[in-house]
Amino acid sequence: MATQTSTRRGGIRVLVSKACATAGLAALYSALLSGCAHAPFDDSPPGVPGHFETVTTTAAPKISHWWTRFGSRELDNFMAEANAGNYDIAVAYARLKQSEATADVTEAALYPTLNFSSDSQRSQGSGTSVPHQVVHPNARNSYNALFNVSYVADVWGQNRNLLEAALHNQDASAYQVEVTRLTARAAVVNDFLIYAADYERVQISKENLTNAKRILAVIKDRAATGTASKLDVSQQDNLVATQEAAIPVLRALAETSRTALALVMGRAPQGFHPVTKSTRGLKLPAVSPGLPSSLLVRRPDIRQAEEQMAADEANVEAARKAFLPTFTLNGDVGRQSALISAFYLPQSVVWSIAASAAQPIFDGGKLRAQLRLSEAQREELLNTYRKSVIQALVDVENALINIRENDLRERALRRAVTSAKEAFDLSEQRLHEGTIDITTLLNVQNTLFTAQDSLVQARLARLQALVALFQALGGDWDNR
């Protein structure tokens, strides 16, 4: 009976055929491995719920080119540049090429090796080996040209198991490329959003600084006429200085996100200055998370863990078959002659063929230790896979919770900003009328400044929660 394992190699599906041994060999295989038998391995995934708690819709997520749904042409251009220039993605591609080469090296063990060797030799003795007797030197020539064929018969399928493991590792590397690409894309959007939000906060701080200076001027005028005290002037001056001190901090945060964005795009930050400096013009895309079970095929990290687990399962089988004997065939064919003139005569043809078998008997427990190591690695990868499934569910649920709660927070802060702005306008009017004390005025100003800054941060958090949801759902990648 024959089974086939379908595996992607460089975008092409390759079928690796694995033929079972004959009945006699199977019996021998069973007898030799009787001491290595192990309990059935439970590789089942963890339970997946039927729906997410935060939402009720089960519509399939539509997240193709998800970053375009924020409505920023500049962000789209940054993403295109990052797709082509991100160095982490380039490193992941290089590792994929390494895994492809490793699979090719492993596959070579399934085929015989053919070598050619050629040499010519001339030798001569000294002619003085017997005392008082001269022996004439005898020159000898030798001409050889041989082809050598060697083949290790994969009777038990150990080399096929190793090839299967290498192909699964190759697929895992391909999924790692998608994981890296997804991480890079999320970083582009997040750094872009942070840059825009921080510069929006800078602009709000500048506007509030202008308001605070205007009120300081009014208080100084009142102090000059005796209707305000030096304490009133000092308190308002302190508020002005506090606003001035906040601007460099926010600007430094924005510039740091700018350099981080340049890095993820694969370009130097010098001369790179995004135009967008506010999140208010960005859209808030709506997205359905779909069914939790869809994460098992949509998340590239889960698919990567699956391939790694399959690779180690094949390695365990190869480690078990290492206890069995190996069979090697060797053959030589070529020409050999002492005279160059006779080298091509039929009599100069030489050949040989040999077969050998080797059975491990005592190795200090090395093979059994290698088997235990492979089984422990398989157990580790199984638990890594199960954790990745649970982590995916957690990521989506957390993103949905943050979207919902930050939406409520943003709405409340919008109302707070509106009321704080009305209170600020009224307090400034009463300041001109001389019917408000400085403590109330300071509280009103601080309330407005804090509410405006908190609103920008809440909107940023909501946008970032959407990015986290797109990332948690597996992003936009081609499941080839």
Image (cartoon, rainbow, N blue to C red):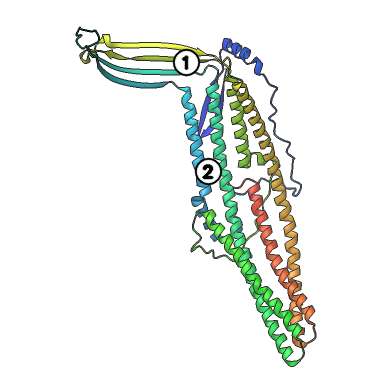
| Residue 294 location (% of width, % of height) | 67, 41
Residue tagged 1: 328
Residue situated in front as seen by the camera: 45 or 108? 108
Left or right of 442: which side holds 326?
A: left
Nearer the observer: mark 1 or 2; the answer is 1
As measured in the structure, the alpha-carbon distance from the residue carrying label 1 to the one carrying label 2 is 38 Å
Q: Earlier in the sequence, mark 1 or mark 2?
A: 2
Q: Secondary structure at mark 2?
A: helix
Q: How many numbered discs?
A: 2
Q: Residue at x 52, y 53 (%)?
A: 82
Task: Give, as a three-letter code, the residue at label 2.
Answer: Ala
Q: Secondary structure at mark 1?
A: strand
Residue tagged 2: 92
Residue situated in front as seen by the camera: 404 or 367? 367
Quarter of the image that includes the C terminus: top right
Furthest residue toward front = 132
Q: Can you see residue 387?
A: yes
Quarter of the image that includes the N terminus: top right
Task: Give, as a three-letter code, the residue at label 1.
Answer: Thr
| Residue 434 location (% of width, % of height) | 78, 87
